[in-house]
Amino acid sequence: MLATREPLGRFIVLAHNEKGIITKSSIEQEIDDLVDIIKVRVQSKKLKAVAESLYERIFEIRFDVIEWSANQNISVSDYLHKINHEIANKLQLAHYSDLAKEAATVLDVHEKIFSPIAEKLTLDNFGQLLDELNNNKPTYETIKLLSIHPAPQIQYLKKWLDTSLDIEFGLILSDLILTGQIEFSKKRINELILFLKDTINRYGAYSIFTGFWQPCSDDVSNLTNKMQILAATIEMDNNIYYKTSKEELFNFVNN
């Protein structure tokens, strides 16, 4: 459970906007602190640098929200219609519309990529999920060790995870802008759109390289083609190393 079927960034913004959705005050405070940090840092720093500085914090919130939702026996997706309604009010402005469309693309493509991964990694019910989290809850410090593993696919599992955290950050920032909590110039919004495009491209490429995902043969979209090209480039750059099989990789993740 290093990642989730649906990114939690949009839910994080909703939980920040509407107090009481998350009934555990410590998680609510974590989310408020994260949003406050983002609001400050994006004013003076590049988006990628801000995202990287928040990997550990976002990773911890992700697991806290997963654990909370499992305890409550609810799905965070049940709440998202509320923030979707808020965002819809902004779409008459062209630059907001472009950002909203890109965020929607990221969500759609993430779902396409992660669904087959979820079939192998997602647990069957909330009780099983709670047991897994209680017995084997990872930390970001532990995940960092993947980067020194001799197998490139294991090393790229760390990159894959970090890119999933980039997605969370990008969606959080997008929704903060689209709900009027951060004022961004058109230039900065375009920077965010490019960040989202690059992030989902890398996420797809890393998913292919690690063996987590293989695009359907009839998927001839430009984005999928870019992902495959990047994945092939990564594979060529690492062809002198031992290549981990898909089965070995899934066993590594689950043990």
Image (cartoon, rainbow, N blue to C red):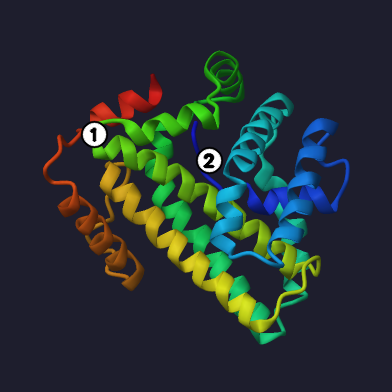
Of residues 42 and 253, the one nearer the viewer is: 42
Compared across the picture, whether 251 is left or right of 54 comes to left
Q: Residues within 10 Å of mark 1 (few under 14, many from 20)?
A: some
Alpha-carbon distance for marks 1 and 2? 24 Å
Q: Secondary structure at mark 2?
A: loop
Look at discs 1 and 2 and give the one toward the viewer. 1
> Which quarter of the figure has residue 86?
bottom right
Q: Can you identify the residue that label 1 sits on? A: 151
**Circle 2: residue type:** Thr
Q: Residue furthest front?
A: 44
In the rendered image, the vertical position of residue 23 relative to residue 169, given as above or below: above
Label 1 vs 2, first from the N-terminus: 2
In the rendered image, the vertical position of residue 199 relative to residue 64, given as above or below: below
Q: Quadrant of the C terminus?
A: top left
Residue 49 in percent (x, y) is at: 56, 57
Q: Residue furthest left?
A: 240
**Circle 1: residue type:** Ala
Residue 247 in percent (x, y) is at: 24, 29
Residue 98 in percent (x, y) is at: 59, 79
Residue 172 in percent (x, y) is at: 67, 56
For the point 56% across and 74% down, the residue is 191
Q: Can you identify the residue that label 2 sits on? A: 4
